[in-house]
């Protein structure tokens, strides 16, 4: 989640924490509420450990000609603030330096380390992940509002299915045009076999289900929208190795990771309200997305052209 600076006077802000306490339990960079500053805090074992870290950061900062604000309080509590003052916010210089700082050895307070790890475990157990941030001007009804609000299968079919539908029009949507290639990619690169169980999370209108059913022993089509689930039942429910399931909620996809060999999210990840929580519950994961390389905000899928990947 590194920011990309575009010239000295411009920046593109980060969208969340750069370091997750679950994957890096000894440190945590946090994005400030105004998205203009990165902060990392910890307690060192003693004064000497704090000073060794600060001196090491000083050498990195001098070499990069980019200097964080450094605070040491209570003789061993360390706080670093990273920001690019010339632009009043974050640039690539900040995240590059943050990455180098994270590579430093630090002698942490054992009690502090135990507390941080315990808090991370408790958060995981309780499912306290905050809902993902998103562009509310574009997703006016929420990340899944359009699909959940309209539960009429006929209305959803007219809008999203068939050669003229938003999901299945091969002339307007790369995913629809490449559906056979996507299935083959799972065989070639994700280990999908005739004995495998594959889950399609966010199966929608069932674009991939028939193709998946031909190469896997079982297909689990997981879909949050009641209207789409009815469409799935009508269109692919007759296939003997396809099961249509409903997620328990936006945190639980309703899958048993021990019984699923591959879980596919095809143009779906950005609709996960609690992505980290969901990903932890689905086992082996393949994400396939077709998206604009850069835009100030996401655009509808029916606008292919220059800049698409």
Image (spheres, helix red, strand yellow):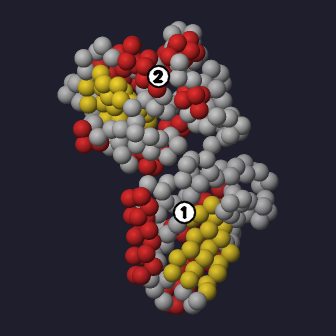
Q: Which mark is residue 99?
A: 1
- Tell which residue pokes out farthest to the left in this image: 195
Residue 109 rendering spot, x and y as whole percentages = 44, 83
Image position of 88 with respect to 50: above or below? above
| Side (left or right) of 34 relative to 164 | right
**Which callout, 1 or 2, points at the residue further toward the start of the chain?**
1
> Who's the residue at 19% across and 28% down the image?
195
Label 1 residue SS = helix
Residue 51 rendering spot, x and y as whole percentages = 55, 86
Asked whether residue 178 appears in the rendered view, the answer is no
Asked whether residue 76 appears in the rendered view, the answer is yes
Residue 140 rendering spot, x and y as whole percentages = 68, 35
Number of numbered callouts drawn: 2
Residue bearing mark 2: 228
Residue 127 rendering spot, x and y as whole percentages = 44, 54
- Tell which residue pokes out farthest to the top in this image: 163
> Who's the residue at 48% across and 56% down the image?
128
Label 2 residue SS = helix
**Badge 2 density bin: few <14, some 14–19, many ≥20, Cα 10 Å:** many
Q: Nearer the viewer, residue 248 or 309?
A: 248
| Side (left or right) of 118 relative to 240 | right
> Who's the residue at 56% across and 65% down the image?
29
Eye-nearest disc, 1 or 2: 2
> Who's the residue at 48% across and 45% down the image?
275
| Side (left or right) of 186 relative to 25 | left
**Badge 1 density bin: few <14, some 14–19, many ≥20, Cα 10 Å:** few
């Amino acid at each position: 989640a590194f920011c990309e600076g575009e010239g000295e006077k411009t920046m593109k802000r980060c969208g969340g924490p750069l370091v997750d306490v679950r994957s890096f339990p000894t440190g945590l960079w946090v994005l400030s509420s105004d998205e203009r500053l990165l902060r990392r805090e910890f307690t060192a074992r003693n004064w000497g450990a704090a000073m060794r870290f600060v001196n090491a950061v000083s050498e990195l900062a001098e070499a990069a000609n980019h200097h964080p604000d450094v605070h040491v309080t209570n003789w061993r509590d360390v706080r670093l603030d990273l920001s690019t003052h010339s632009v009043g916010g974050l640039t690539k210089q900040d995240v590059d330096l943050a990455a180098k700082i994270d590579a430093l050895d630090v002698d942490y307070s054992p009690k502090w380390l135990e507390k941080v790890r315990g808090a991370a475990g408790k958060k995981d157990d309780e499912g306290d992940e905050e809902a993902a941030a998103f562009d509310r001007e574009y997703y006016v009804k929420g990340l899944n509002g359009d699909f959940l609000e309209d539960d009429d299968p006929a209305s959803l079919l007219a809008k999203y299915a068939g050669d003229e539908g938003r999901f299945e029009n091969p002339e307007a949507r790369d995913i629809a045009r490449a559906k056979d290639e996507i299935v083959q990619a799972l065989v070639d690169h994700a280990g999908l076999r005739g004995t495998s169980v594959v889950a399609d999370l966010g199966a929608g209108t069932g674009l991939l289900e028939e193709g998946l059913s031909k190469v896997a022993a079982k297909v689990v089509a997981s879909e949050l929208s009641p209207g789409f689930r009815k469409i799935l039942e009508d269109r692919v429910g007759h296939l003997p190795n396809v099961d249509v399931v409903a997620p328990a909620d936006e945190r639980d996809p309703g899958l048993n990771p021990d019984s699923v060999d591959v879980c596919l999210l095809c143009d779906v990840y950005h609709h996960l309200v609690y992505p980290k929580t969901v990903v932890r519950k689905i086992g082996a994961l393949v994400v396939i997305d077709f998206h604009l390389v850069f835009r100030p905000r996401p655009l509808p899928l029916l606008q292919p052209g220059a800049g698409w990947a």
